[in-house]
């Protein structure tokens, strides 16, 4: 296990993911309370809001109020998401509170591209070209590329690793052509098809082509393999992971009512810390934030650790 | 990944584990229905009942009725559990329906031994000596050894791999001395402390000492790492796992109310089958059994796959 990284960076997506998919209205103050609880745990990158059409995603009608309301903490980057130039304009109003960057997003599945992005791959590339131009016009760097459905798709089935490489090559070519410096490439298991073996294959194929890329794994725990897939990523030297407190979230278009969403941040932190991989996160504080998320959302969330708890208190009692 | 086994054997513990820990009374007919649903999935070893003191474990007061009631299926071994010579006598009445074997059980944690087995290690060895004699007198072979708390303990903290080797050596010495042929050694994560790294260390230490032993991993998903630990076991060539349908169970003495129990059989089957490791289990039939378990127990069970579902129907739809 000497091949494990010494530290990992976790990008917290719980607030954005969790409040996006929930049906009922969640109080703005509760959203802010969760963000502030998360920033107190040692997490350094927190995605706090989606600037999206409130008619399509009513849960984010209060994006402005949420972003205006949290208490910025030194050393923490607050991120947000948007998909259109109009919504980029909304984000620009918060340059002082948010770390703004754009993404070039593609899908390794044509069927998922059409459903989730409303365009086929060629159409999406064209839309991304306009997206890059809008960001550049606004002085917002485009630093990310993201491949959705990198490990399989509910609508088109298994996704060959070569397809992931192919669509990512298109995204990176667009970035180069438009003068964007891509800092991170996210491979997203949008619908919970990843297995340790698929992670090895896709990651291996991407690494072979672009050894220098910094890969982010965005894993869902739809079928219970999320942490095992993260472990495979760790073994392959991945040092950046998306995760969501309490395991909230999941793709609203993927149609698994009640299924777990993203891998739970606290389970990933526990996995890492117990194996000597630093995360910079205080697990007990994070478990408190997970319990808060459960109270706010008003339902039992998927994370096992909310109920299992950490080992710190048990070790202290045993040593006493 | 060429080091993965070609097939694994899963020992289903759901009926025994699930009905042991539940508070309310569960109808005997429901217990039988779940056992029969499980035997129809392709699982070949199912632990169906505990012969225990009904005053201590009221949920198993109907052990005789359950064992008398299920419909034996060709090729399936039905197992049961008991801890005292008196309860062994109860099991003997079902030689025609159950595959009877005894176990030498020890704990790698003294504190857990005292709490869960009511004796320290030396006392437990003495009790096991009597246990072996009772089995031999009844003509029931003692073929298993089991080490509880192999990966850590809520009451004594971290457990060194050397301690697991040491107590297992005592158990195997007792077996040899009493003429028992141990066929399988179970390393049990009784309280959910296992991580992939601890599995490697303990399994490595046991393998170094006894390269020929057939190891069974008994993993709990208390903190969400169960499937990742199973994956580590697979990579190290472990081919036998305990699991419980829908993730029911957990140690009643370990005190994690509501925490997940054993790793969910359907998640383990999914992990294996998606990586080309045969289990002999029909995942869709198993998911039906998991849904039945959830209906019978009347609460949301921990398995992610109950809600996430398998990929078979999605692949078929994508191919259509």
Image (cartoon, coloured by chain):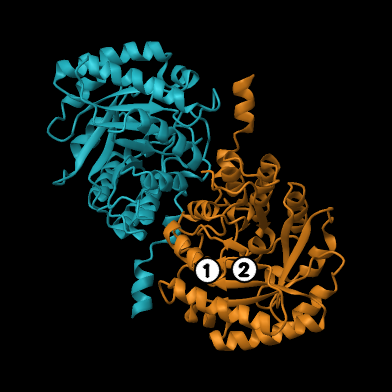
Chain colours: A cyan, B orange
Labels 1 and 2 share a subunit: yes
Mark 2 is surrounded, within 10 Å at the Cα level, by few (under 14), some (14 to 19) or many (20 or more) other residues, namely many
Q: Nearer the viewer, residue A246 or A231?
A: A231
Residue A312 position, x and y percent, is 34, 67
Q: Nearer the viewer, residue A291 or A144?
A: A144
Q: Is residue A191 left or right of residue B95?
A: left
Cα gap from disc 1 to disc 2, whole angstroms: 10 Å
Q: Is residue B218 left or right of residue B73?
A: left
Which residue, given by chain and number where applicable, does mark 2 sit on? B185
Q: Is residue B2 left or right of residue B50?
A: left
Q: Quadrant of the C terminus of chain B?
A: top right
Residue B72 position, x and y percent, is 84, 56
Q: Nearer the viewer, residue B239 or A37?
A: B239
Q: Which mark is residue B206?
A: 1
Name the residue at 32% across, 59% down. Answer: A276
Dot 1: element: helix
Q: Is residue A184 left or right of residue A304?
A: left
Between tags 1 and 2, which lies in front?
1
Name the residue at 26% across, 12% down. Answer: A130
Q: Quadrant of residue B134?
A: bottom right
Q: Is residue B110 above or below residue B150?
A: below
Task: Please indicate, yes or no, whether residue A167 appears anywhere in the rendered image.
Answer: yes
Mark 1 is surrounded, within 10 Å at the Cα level, by few (under 14), some (14 to 19) or many (20 or more) other residues, namely many
Residue B237 position, x and y percent, is 56, 54
Q: CB of mark 1 within 8 Å of CB of mark 2?
A: yes
* Subunit bearing disc 1: B
Q: Is residue A288 above or below residue B89?
A: above
Name the residue at 19% across, 29% down. Answer: A100
Q: Is residue A267 above or below residue B162?
A: above
Task: Please indicate, yes or no, whether residue B153 appears anywhere in the rendered image.
Answer: no
């Amino acid at each position: 296990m000497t091949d494990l990284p010494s530290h990992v960076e976790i990008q917290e997506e719980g607030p954005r993911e969790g409040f996006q998919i929930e049906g009922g209205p969640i109080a703005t103050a509760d959203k802010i309370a969760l963000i502030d609880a998360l920033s107190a745990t040692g997490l350094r990158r927190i995605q706090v809001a989606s600037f999206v059409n409130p008619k399509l995603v009513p849960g984010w009608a209060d994006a402005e109020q949420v972003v205006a309301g949290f208490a910025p903490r030194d050393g923490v980057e607050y991120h947000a998401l948007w998909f259109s130039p109009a919504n980029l304009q909304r984000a620009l109003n918060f340059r002082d509170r948010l770390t703004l960057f754009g993404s070039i997003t593609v899908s390794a599945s044509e069927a998922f591209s059409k459903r989730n992005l409303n365009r086929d791959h060629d159409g999406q590339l064209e839309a991304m070209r306009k997206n890059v131009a809008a960001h550049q016009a606004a002085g917002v760097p485009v630093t990310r590329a993201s491949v959705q459905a990198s490990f399989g798709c509910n609508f088109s089935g298994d996704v060959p690793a070569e397809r992931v490489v192919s669509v990512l090559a298109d995204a990176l070519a667009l970035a180069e052509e438009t003068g964007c410096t891509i800092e991170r490439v996210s491979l997203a298991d949008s619908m919970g098809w990843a297995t340790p073996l698929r992670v090895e294959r896709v990651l291996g194929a991407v690494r072979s082509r672009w050894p220098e890329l910094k890969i982010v794994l965005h894993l869902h725990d739809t079928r219970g393999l999320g942490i095992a897939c993260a472990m495979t990523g760790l073994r392959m030297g991945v040092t950046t992971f998306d995760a969501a407190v309490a395991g909230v979230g999941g793709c609203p278009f993927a149609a698994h009512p009640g299924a777990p969403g993203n891998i739970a941040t606290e389970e990933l932190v526990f996995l890492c810390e117990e194996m000597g991989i630093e995360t910079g996160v205080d697990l007990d504080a994070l478990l408190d934030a997970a319990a808060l998320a459960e109270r706010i959302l008003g339902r039992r969330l998927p994370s096992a650790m909310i109920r299992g708890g950490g080992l710190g208190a048990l070790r202290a009692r045993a040593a006493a």
